[in-house]
Image: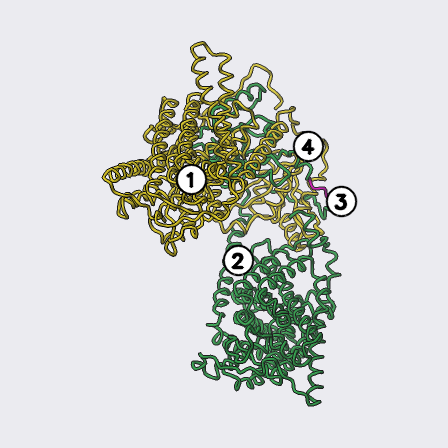
Chain colours: A yellow, B green
Amino acid sequence: MTIEAKRLLVGQPLRTGSLGQQLLTKRLALPVFCSDPISSVAYATQEILLVLALGGPMLLHLTRGVGLAILMLLGIVVASYRQICFTYPSGGGAYVVSRDTLGERASLVAAAALLVDYVLTVAVSVVAGVDAITSYAAALNRHAVALSLGFVLLLMLVNLRGLKESGRGFAAPTYAFIAGIFLMFAVAAWRVMTGQHLHAVSANFHLQPAHHLARLLLVVLVLRAFASGCTALTGVEAVSNGIPAFRPPKSRNAATTLAVMGVLSATMFGGITLLALLTHVQMADEPGRLLGAPAGYVEPTALAQIAEAVFGPGPIFAFIQAATAGILVLAANTAFNGFPVLTSLLARDGYLPRQLHHRGDRLVFSNGIIVLALAAGLLVVVFDANVSRLIQLYILGVFVSFTLAQAGMVRRWQRDLARATDRQRQRIRRGQVINALGAVTTALVLVIVVVTKFSHGAWIVCVAMPALFLLMRHIGRYYEKVRQETALHDEPTRPASNHALVLVSGLNQPTAQAVAYARAIYPASLEAVTVQIEQDETEELKRAWADHHVDVPLVVLYSPYREITRPVVDYVRTYPRSSPRDVITVVIPQRVAGRWWEQPLHNHSALRIKSRLLFQPAVVVTSVPYQLRSAIARVHRPDTGDRDTLILHAARHTSPQPPSRL
Amino acid sequence: MTIEAKRLLVGQPLRTGSLGQQLLTKRLALPVFCSDPISSVAYATQEILLVLALGGPMLLHLTRGVGLAILMLLGIVVASYRQICFTYPSGGGAYVVSRDTLGERASLVAAAALLVDYVLTVAVSVVAGVDAITSYAAALNRHAVALSLGFVLLLMLVNLRGLKESGRGFAAPTYAFIAGIFLMFAVAAWRVMTGQHLHAVSANFHLQPAHHLARLLLVVLVLRAFASGCTALTGVEAVSNGIPAFRPPKSRNAATTLAVMGVLSATMFGGITLLALLTHVQMADEPGRLLGAPAGYVEPTALAQIAEAVFGPGPIFAFIQAATAGILVLAANTAFNGFPVLTSLLARDGYLPRQLHHRGDRLVFSNGIIVLALAAGLLVVVFDANVSRLIQLYILGVFVSFTLAQAGMVRRWQRDLARATDRQRQRIRRGQVINALGAVTTALVLVIVVVTKFSHGAWIVCVAMPALFLLMRHIGRYYEKVRQETALHDEPTRPASNHALVLVSGLNQPTAQAVAYARAIYPASLEAVTVQIEQDETEELKRAWADHHVDVPLVVLYSPYREITRPVVDYVRTYPRSSPRDVITVVIPQRVAGRWWEQPLHNHSALRIKSRLLFQPAVVVTSVPYQLRSAIARVHRPDTGDRDTLILHAARHTSPQPPSRL
């Protein structure tokens, strides 16, 4: 990608100094960090219905009880995470908390769970958003995969442009969705009170129980429905992760945002669940189980059925669907905010490749964004843009990280208790109780999720999480090993003599320049080395060498197998050294071309030789570039010619101690 | 690919000295170079029949006249090419001949035609070979594409193993095919003489004329049939290209081989065409036009129908089909012998990337072989392994190169005539007449081919050939421009001062080693340079720098956009130089890891910085490798520790003239 194209797609780079201006007000933080938990009310109810519907229409009334249990759970989790906001003001997701309190192993489990969740958040939210669209425009249903991929791509580009634009551009759909749902509640209440009947489109169908129901106990079915409904809780963690992006007082603002989010989510989830029961929404994962449905019936989402029942098929229904699609697509944005921060943290701690650590030039973590978009796009394609199938994978990781974060907080309170004043003790005890309740509850849910969802797809996560865990631990141990291996273990041997070899294939300006450079590093010995492939060419080179009186011995290497790399490497390897501390500098003239299509026409042998020589101890490889005209045209000009703005610190160490040999 | 896997697939490398042992006897040269023209009799007759069948069964008798015309053409072309064998004993294809006599432009046209032809030879021959198999085992018909690709892959591997094995392994099928066809002639003659009737399987069907026939004049149809039948001539050029591979006397042996090939081809093509008429073979490009054919009729090749009519469906029929498949697949081998030689010639002359010039380590031109296999594989897939569709593309390029080669020979004779003795003049006149006849005839055929085949696919070649021509001319001009640009135009400026900058990100052994090396090149100034991304990291580095009393100033660069590359490049660009002849050496410590999965974990920033610095004039980049333990384990050991066998020539130039400043 050229610089120009990159600028067009992702905008101008931002300076570190402008990071402060990027901080979010609560009003902007809500859409950025809470669109995920709020938007999940768009599908949580329907996932409960879909499971209970396996038992036929007479089980649907259980939705109410399942919904109530989920509301209680939501309250506990929100309260627990508010504690984290105050305790970890620099941002504390499950990874940070468990690393601080439970050790490396637990923190990597949490990290693996979070990574998997971010990917699933993108996939589930985008696919559910597309469902909202196809519930209004059924004809688009067969393009669901393409639409979903389009949204993932769009999100990737928006996020590569930077944090603030995301907050602003995404505020409208969140507030539109919240407003739309509450308007729906109001109109529904008014219509019920005036004695009108609300009927969902599927209310008239005859729901058949699933064939395999015989094998299921009622309690298992209810627990599975509960586990599915727990998607309403996904994304609660985002706020506590994103505290640094809030305006000060950061912790207080974040905790308030979390509370507002909790109240909004609870109200909307409760209201939608009640309306689903009232309008008799019936859903089935196999369309054949809905007797009386017309041929080619594309099942609308539960929320769409409710909205149509309340508003009729007019423009307000269309608005609700558009707002739903909007908030869901930007819920995926929550993950695009969180994932790169987490991978950057993990890379900083050495558990992921270092290039994920540094920010790109838009104050965001470009590499992480791209990895996330690719992984989510893959899931969308593999699961054929089906929300219910993706949901099975989603909840497991969420509750792993919930449990670890809360358990970590319990341990943290214990630690704080030891050095607390009496006045603090009361607050700590209260926090400990809240987090202990959170830990026990979420652990219980985790068990339920694993048991009821394992065979429905959760096994994939049960494989992916340990794989990620092992990968990160492996990388962590590798970096640690390299750090120990490369630690300053002794005074490095100052080279005794430096022998220079210039690789030549012809006598031309690049070669002459390389020879001139080699002289300027004052080598103990200097030779030009060429490999004979075709005798004619070598003879011509030797003639030119003599004609120009080049005062450097020309060594011709015999290449019995017409290779170039091996003779050079062997020659360097066996070069006679007078001391083991001798170094050999191999000087390679390199033609630098400016246009992409010129690259395959130059420097193949040189690059292959170079990559092989790097493996030889006490051999240094020097590239003396010769810029062709096309390359000179491409030379980068600095933004400012002002050196002072460039150099932060240039200290001459006039240390009182004797200088080291280094 | 690891060295071990490569050895297993392509065998041990061969020394240049063993090139002599690779020379071919006539008995081996025939299968290697003549399998292509000989094997084309397997499909030439059928392509004539397919075109004439467009006019219905009453036109099939014209096959005889068309066949006779092709036999005459074959005689002329073989006679013409025998002249080339004697005139260009070091190998003269259309490229060499036209470059020598008609200039660069014509030679590149010839080269483009030959490159296209080699690719089509592989595609057509392999696909026709698979047709021979499916004519016996119709069930394999739906795997035709996969089978064809398998053969292409097999040929690629066999050829990567070297020339000789190809000759040996491929001799058997050629002689089996020749023997089989002559046996078929003998049995057919005996059965006809004993009064038996020979009937092809398709003789009983009712052939319908094609619907679009009304638009075709009879003469056009006959010319198209003739053009299709000209495939019998493809590959004649291979012998004259391959003269260096013959045992001495090379020219005489090659000319003899060419004559033997001509007689064999003519006899077999004539015989097969007669038998096709005798057995009433009927073929149609649309199966629906053969009324009376059973449902799911997979049309056997004409040769298969004849063989079955003569031998019945027993083991001899199977043998004929196997031999046919065998010779066709190895006909593709002709191209695998010729293509890499041609691309190597073109690369030597600077019309293709240089890496195609040098031989790989198996005395063959590995890169060319791989390119050829890829291109042919692509054609097989695009044309769905259909011989008749591929044939339309095939003949055009063949006759372009025939015409250019013969026209070039006429010019060459004219040149020779000027300085010839009287005794030579007679022979030259005779040669000139033969080649003039060849040039005129093949030019005429070329016109017929273009006119009758253009809309049937030959347009693809009419696009591909000019594209290749322009590409090669462009590369040629580019290399020439670079050669002029890099020619030794003046004494290169010996650097006035050499300033060394060591890039550091932490104080560790690789950094210390790089600093130690930088001291050993005696720079006029020495600095360590780091880029501040995270302030903590920089502070730690500064502390370590002070703690270890490193006596090198540490310059910290400010990176407002958290980039690493740009600040370094800007710093180097604006580095204060006391003279324009100053050089800056940027020393980069580089960790070298031995395992593939370690690569993504190291050196990203270093490599990006390096590739950008190469564009800066008067900047030299030096990599000081630090081998991690995994890399040390992988260090290459030379085959021999014997330096004397390695160095061919090491001259100390004690020139009497004063040494140059170089």
Identify the residue position indicated by label 3 in the image.
B640
| Residue type indicated by callout 4 | Asp
Tell me which chain the residue with mark 4 is part of.
Answer: A
Upstream in sequence: badge 2 or badge 3? 2
Residue B559's place in the image compared with B97, above or below, is: above
Question: Which SS type dominates the magenta stretch?
Answer: loop
Please give the residue where the numbered disc 4 appears in the rendered image: A582
**Mark 4 → mark 1, Cα distance in angstroms:** 74 Å
Q: Name the disc covering residue B476, or none.
A: 2
Residue B190 spot, x, y in % from top left: 71, 86
Specify start and end residues of the magenta stretch as a single range.
B635-639
Judge depth for marks 3 and 1 and give the one in front.
1
- Mark 2 — on which chain does it sit? B
Q: Foreground residue, A332 or B249?
A: A332
Q: Closest to the observer: B538 or A293?
A: A293
Instruction: Same chain for labels 3 and 1? Say yes or no.
Output: no
Q: Dot 4: few (<14), some (14–19), or many (≥20) neighbours within 10 Å?
A: some
